[in-house]
Image (tube, helix red, strand yellow):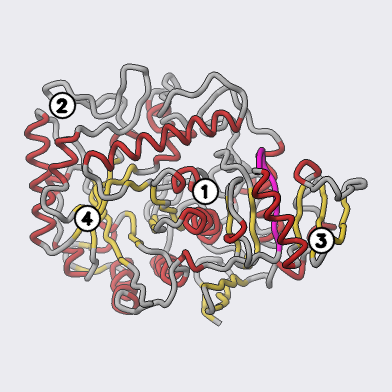
Amino acid sequence: MENFIHIGYNNFSGNTDKTDFRDPAKMGADFIVCHFDPIGKALKEECEFAAGVAKKIKDMGLNFVANFEFPNFSDHRQTTDGFDWCNNPDGTHRLNLPEEYVKAIASHGNLIGIMHDEMEHVLINTNLSITLDKNGRNHLPMFLPGDTKDVVEQGETCSQQFAEYAENFRKMGAPVFVGEHVFPVLYHTFARNGIIPNFKSQKESYSNLQFAVAAGAAMQYGTELWSCIDLWHKLTYPGHTADEMYHNLVFSYLTGVDRVYVEASNQFYDGDRLTDYGKAYKKFIDKYKNKPRNYTVRDYKPEIGIIRYDDTYWGQGDPIAWRKILFGNKKIKPDKRAKEWVRVFRLITHGETSKHAINWNRISPWSLKPHRSFASMNGTAVFDDRVEKDKLTSLKLCFLCGYHISEKTLKAVGELVKENGLTAVTSKRFAPAHIKAKGSFTKVKDGKGCWIITNRFDSLKLRKAVSQFLGSKGEMTYRFGNEKFTLKISENGEVFEII
């Protein structure tokens, strides 16, 4: 099997009548992520304009993804004849597209799909960008939260809402529906409901940590995996070097990502002159665009697994921006169960990530540390609470944490402990009935493998007990099918070499 990566160019023009598509064609990109904004006309004119943009891209010989971000920043946006692009009668706020508009952007046969930019951010932070713009007076939910304090009940409601939302776009003519994630949450909820996972690299996260979560979702549900290499870091643009960008592109290639693009690609040119970013992007295209791989992300064979309910917790909770709630529901506050997987990542990254959050967004002394794209980590994947046995057979070490894990999944893990020699680490609540825990740390042999019952997922005692599975500090190791490779991380964490 030969598999080629599709390399994209993100045109962040704001209003698409100013878009110039010559650069991506010249660069050798094979698709565009094009941001569509309403142009302030009647719906018929909006559709005609959108169809014209699609034709302009078709004439350049390119396919495109229609990206929509404007609802994340606009509390009101309507056509002159009354269609509302983002508000609903029940008080919810999200991207609304009429069927005739979707058909217009698909009318020239080169539409890859529709992307809702930073969709998980909109849900879990209740349209935070609008809230900050309105001095905290607005908290606009993407969907109506349930009248519940139960995490799993709210999660299943949210899952159904996303399923219906995505299906509606596909019924209107979108070949696929795609999210774009700032935070490493909701990948599994999206993938389960037909929304392609699309992780941001660089930005404020460790790229390989984002990959671990998104890849687990793509593996588990058999979806494509996309990656956005984002040049923003907090409020700084560009907040990452050209060399870091290049290595994040290479990381996407090596790890079997299906589509990758850079946000925002207008950094590639200074007038007619290629910048260092443009040169790095062109270098990647020249080297990797037509270089086949004999695997995809769905052939990933992780050695470390994390199984948890997809509860939207990444470490939120500070006095300014990030509301300490789950699923955007103010009635549901995260407790220590939500925080367990953050401690697991601290353990398996040799202490390089924070014990309070899994990226740089949380306001804390730790977040003042210089950003790094890559953390020490042996091949890891995150699965949700209903993962089946066949997806777990490559694991040597597995962590069970969070609010809920299905009986079928717990049974599968138990069988892999006995039959395959898996080491399973859990709190008491997910331990099998025949495993008796004593005190704060218990290790019990069970068939070929063992169970470790602990009340702290980043303790020194646990780290020593599982050290043989964690790989070497300063390295990332991956296996896809029969291929295995190790990446040695630079001192500043921005680049790597293949060893």
Say which of marks 2 and 3 sits in front: 3
Which residue lies at the image location 22% right of the left edge and 69% below the top edge? 27
Contact between labelled residues 2 and 1, with CB atoms less than 8 Å apart:
no
> Could you tell me which secondary element the residue under label 4 belongs to?
strand
Measured along the vertical axis of the image, is residue 70 above or below residue 380? above
Q: Residues within 10 Å of mark 1 (few under 14, many from 20)?
A: many
Q: Residues within 10 Å of mark 3 (few under 14, many from 20)?
A: many
Q: Position of residue 266 (x, y in %)?
A: 25, 57
Left or right: 112 as drawn, with respect to 2: left
> Could you tell me which secondary element the residue under label 2 belongs to?
loop
Which residue lies at the image location 22% right of the left edge and 39% below the top edge? 172
| Residue 12 at least partly seen | no
Contact between labelled residues 3 and 2, with CB atoms less than 8 Å apart:
no
Tag 3 or tag 4, which sits nearer the N-term?
Answer: 4
Q: Which residues are magenta?
A: 397-405
What residue is disc 1 on? Answer: 184
Which residue lies at the image location 43% right of the left edge and 53% below the top edge? 200
Q: Position of residue 82 (x, y in %)?
A: 16, 21
Residue type at numbered disc 3: Cys
Tag 4 or tag 2, which sits nearer the N-term?
Answer: 4
> Could you tell me which secondary element the residue under label 1 belongs to?
loop
In the rendered view of the protein, which quadrant contains the C terminus? bottom right
Q: Is residue 344 magenta?
A: no
Q: CA distance from mark 4 to mark 1?
A: 25 Å
Q: Is residue 400 magenta?
A: yes
Residue lying farthest to the right in this orientation:
438
What residue is disc 2 on? Answer: 79
Tag 3 or tag 2, which sits nearer the N-term?
Answer: 2
What residue is disc 3 on? Answer: 450
